[in-house]
Image (spheres, rainbow, N blue to C red):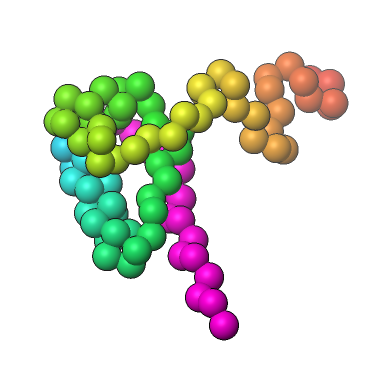
Amino acid sequence: MATPAPRPIVCDLSALGDADAEIIDLLGRLRLAARRQDRTLRLLHASPALRDLIAFVGLDSVLRLEPGREAEERKDPGGVEKEGQLDDPAV
């Protein structure tokens, strides 16, 4: 019986705050942990600032960022109504 290929570790970076050295360290450690388990790491939806910082520190060939949708293209979260779209009239 053949062993199935390990599934990739998928990390959605869209909710991260400011890009800083701590984030870079965390992503580097995550990459090492994935490699030790013979798994790949998929980094999705990185902000332009995070992409720039990863390139600046020279890790863009190690931490491969997959293209993601820009913030304007993302779907609005379900169940959230914008101001002025309420069904109930203001009292």
**Residue 30 occupies which quadrant of the picture?**
bottom left
- Residue 75 appears left or right of 53: right
Q: Determine the residue located farthest toward the front in the rendered image.
A: 1
Can you say which quadrant of the picture contains the C terminus? top right
Q: Visible in this render: residue 23?
A: no
What percent of the width, then of the height, locates residue 77? 64, 35
Tell whether position 7 is magenta.
yes
Which residue does the image show at 17% across and 25% down from the upper left? 56
Q: Quadrant of residue 61?
A: top left
Residue at position x 20%, y 36% in the image: 59
* In this picture, residue 88 sits left or right of residue 53: right
Quick check: is 41 in the magenta stretch? no
Residue 57: x %, y % from top left: 14, 31
Count of labels in the image? 0
Magenta range is 1-19
In this picture, residue 33 sits left or right of residue 89: left
- Asked whether 86 or 4 is in front, the reply is 4
The percent position of residue 28, horizontal first and vertical second, equals: 22, 48
Split into 4 quadrants, where in the image is the N terminus?
Answer: bottom right
| Depth check, front residue: 45 or 61 | 61
Question: Is residue 91 rendered to the left or right of residue 25?
Answer: right
The answer to whether residue 1 shows anywhere in this view is yes
Q: Is residue 79 above or below residue 41?
A: above
Which residue ends up furthest to the bottom in the rendered image? 1
Examine the residues drawn in magenta and state their main secondary structure. Answer: loop
Residue 62 placement (x, y as % from top left): 25, 41
Residue at point 59%, 27% (across, down): 74
Q: Residue at x 16, y 31 (%)?
A: 58
